[in-house]
Image (cartoon, rainbow, N blue to C red):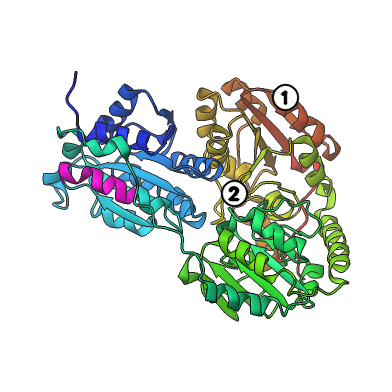
């Protein structure tokens, strides 16, 4: 039997953290660790085509499963390739543990030109992660691993990196008996004090027309948030907070949260309290805080840095969302008197606002309903940044569960396919649809073979307009209509699907999208569906690029 090494400790540690899947690329400076993973045989290792794709897969896997997402990369350029994925995981507060190698300890920081050696790799990792650590000596290994995993899983969650020099990985150690009953030092969530709850009750009970705004930080607060809706609150969400309360709840407008929806902003003028829970009120969704939100804002967030970060609030409570809303709902019941017209006016606004927005979609107006009707209620909806997602995908398409959605919160193009693969691997039998644009799809098209090799059950819905459609809209609005560098030469997707050995469906008429997607969802494995947008019609400019 081989001797126990730090590399095997890494593999066993992950098992003790309930990790059953990891993503990445095997390379010179992580071979000992991945050899340990393979020899132990308890963790599925998904061989990706690039480190960026691996990071996005780990991120989406974590979002869907509520477990630690694991990505292994090589050193230097390999670790740098994962940078955009770690940044996105940070935007999503996703618990991703990034494990990378490092040159031999004697070479670090000495500029000797060792393989994959870059100046200050740890500094680079710190700049793109929540925290980053180096295991400098074998006897530090378990303590650093525990600290790193706990940091990733402690609120606000986020990506954490560890670099392990190759000589440290190979070092022989005694197996720590602490692994037999491993407990991670995850920081306890702060619970609001009785005085803080009483203050909230005093402020909230004065409201006549209150609304909740739920963000990603409220993803575990569905039951308590629903109790406030039962008391008469209306609901709106960030795009990352969608589905926490099912979007078909009559008192929810989901992600149709203001910008580009004049009827929603006008309704906000009648709202006398906006209770924002677990949300940054991101500039991307509020047009850099220019959206006309209600004036009276109260915030609840586990992150103290959220206080007044975007919009000025009247009160702030730094505490965990679910227990705070539960206590608030219990104590405010019987003390709050809702305007008897509020519910009916809210529901009427919802119907009118959704229809008004739908009418801005031109030939794509039927797409939200067609796609939703084709997908099972519990299906996972993954998107890239595309014309279709920036409009109906984020705002009209209904979601029914807070863990059924993944999209690039940082607004990058390209992660969609990889996010879809990671989500599908973590889906536990649920169907997964990833809607991507052709530009984003081609950026990481090699990961299609990862999906095929891993036999992932995934429908890839490519909205193909032959270029960067959103860039055209921006150029029309800012460059007097001059369009430059937006058109892309890409492969014929039918031939690409044939090369990958997967089913292919082309949609050339808007009315056939739903039936085509339904057919694709009957397949097991990967299916490629192309929507030929140039046959269907030009996608209309959307807010703010539709403004004259």
Q: Which residues are magenta?
A: 137-148
**What residue is disc 1 on?**
522
Quick one: SS at disc 2?
loop
Work out whether residue 461 or residue 152 is closer to the camera in this orientation and state it: 152
Quarter of the figure that contains the N terminus:
top left
Residue 142 belongs to magenta span: yes
**Position above or below: 337 against 133:** below
Q: Position of residue 241 (x, y in %)?
A: 63, 56
Answer left or right for 3 relative to 198: left
Q: Residue furthest left?
A: 106
Work out whether residue 257 or residue 236 is closer to the camera in this orientation and state it: 236
Sequence-first disc among 2 and 1: 2
Q: Position of residue 436 (x, y in %)?
A: 63, 42
Q: Position of residue 150 (x, y in %)?
A: 36, 51
> Which residue is drawn at the image coordinates 61% and 65% (left, top)?
327
> Which residue is drawn at the image coordinates 34% and 52% (left, top)?
185
Q: Position of residue 52 (x, y in %)?
A: 44, 43
Quarter of the figure that contains the C terminus:
bottom right
Specify the quadrant of the image occupied by residue 371. top right
> Which residue is drawn at the image coordinates 76% and 74% (left, top)?
268
Specify the quadrant of the image occupied by residue 181. top left
Work out whether residue 263 or residue 534 is closer to the camera in this orientation and state it: 263
């Amino acid at each position: 039997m081989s001797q126990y090494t730090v590399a095997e400790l890494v593999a066993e540690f992950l098992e003790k953290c309930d990790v059953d899947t990891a993503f990445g690329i095997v390379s010179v400076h992580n071979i000992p660790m991945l050899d340990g993973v393979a020899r132990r045989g308890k963790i599925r290792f998904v061989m990706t085509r690039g480190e960026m794709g691996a990071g996005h897969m780990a991120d989406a896997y974590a979002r869907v499963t509520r477990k630690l997402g694991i990505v292994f990369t090589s050193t230097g350029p390999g670790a740098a390739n994962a940078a955009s994925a770690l940044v996105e995981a940070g935007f999503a507060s996703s618990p991703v543990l990034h494990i990378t190698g490092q040159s031999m300890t004697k070479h670090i920081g000495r500029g000797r030109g060792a393989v994959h050696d870059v100046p200050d790799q740890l500094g680079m990792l710190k700049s793109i992660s929540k925290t980053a650590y180096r295991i400098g000596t074998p006897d530090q290994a378990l303590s650093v691993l525990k600290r790193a995993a706990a940091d990733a899983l402690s609120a606000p969650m986020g990506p954490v990196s560890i670099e392990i020099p190759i000589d440290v990985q190979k070092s022989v150690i005694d197996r720590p008996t602490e692994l037999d009953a491993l407990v991670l030092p995850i920081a306890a969530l702060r619970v609001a004090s009785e005085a803080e709850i009483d203050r909230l009750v005093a402020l909230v009970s004065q409201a006549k027309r209150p609304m909740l705004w739920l963000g990603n930080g409220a993803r575990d607060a569905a039951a308590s948030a629903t109790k406030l809706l039962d008391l008469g609150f209306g609901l709106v969400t960030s795009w990352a907070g969608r589905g926490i309360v099912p979007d078909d709840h009559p008192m929810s407008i989901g992600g149709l949260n203001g910008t580009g929806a004049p009827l929603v902003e006008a309704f906000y003028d009648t709202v006398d309290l906006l209770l924002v829970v677990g949300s940054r009120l991101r500039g991307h969704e509020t047009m850099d805080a220019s959206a006309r939100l209600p004036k009276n804002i109260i915030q609840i967030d586990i992150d103290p840095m959220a206080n007044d970060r975007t919009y000025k609030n009247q009160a702030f409570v730094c505490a965990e969302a679910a227990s705070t809303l539960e206590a608030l709902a219990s104590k405010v019941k019987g003390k709050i008197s809702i305007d008897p017209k509020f519910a009916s006016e809210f529901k009427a606004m919802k119907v009118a606002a959704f229809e008004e927005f739908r009418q801005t979609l031109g030939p794509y107006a039927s797409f939200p309903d067609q796609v939703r009707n084709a997908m099972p209620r519990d299906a996972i909806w993954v998107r890239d940044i595309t014309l279709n997602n920036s409009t109906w995908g984020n705002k009209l398409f209904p979601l029914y569960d807070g863990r059924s959605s993944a999209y690039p919160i940082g607004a990058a193009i390209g992660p969609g396919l990889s996010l879809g693969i990671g989500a599908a691997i973590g889906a536990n039998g649920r169907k997964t649809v990833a809607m991507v644009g052709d530009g984003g799809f081609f950026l990481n098209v090699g990961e299609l073979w990862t999906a095929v090799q891993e036999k992932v059950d995934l429908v890839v819905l490519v909205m193909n307009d032959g270029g960067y459609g959103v860039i055209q809209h921006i150029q029309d609005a800012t460059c007097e209509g001059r369009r430059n560098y937006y058109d892309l030469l890409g492969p014929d997707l039918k031939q690409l699907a044939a090369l990958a050995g997967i089913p292919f469906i082309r949609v050339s008429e808007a009315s056939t999208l739903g039936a085509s997607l339904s057919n694709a969802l009957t397949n097991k494995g990967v299916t490629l569906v192309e929507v030929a947008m140039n046959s269907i019609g030009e996608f209309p400019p959307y807010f703010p690029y539709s403004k004259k």
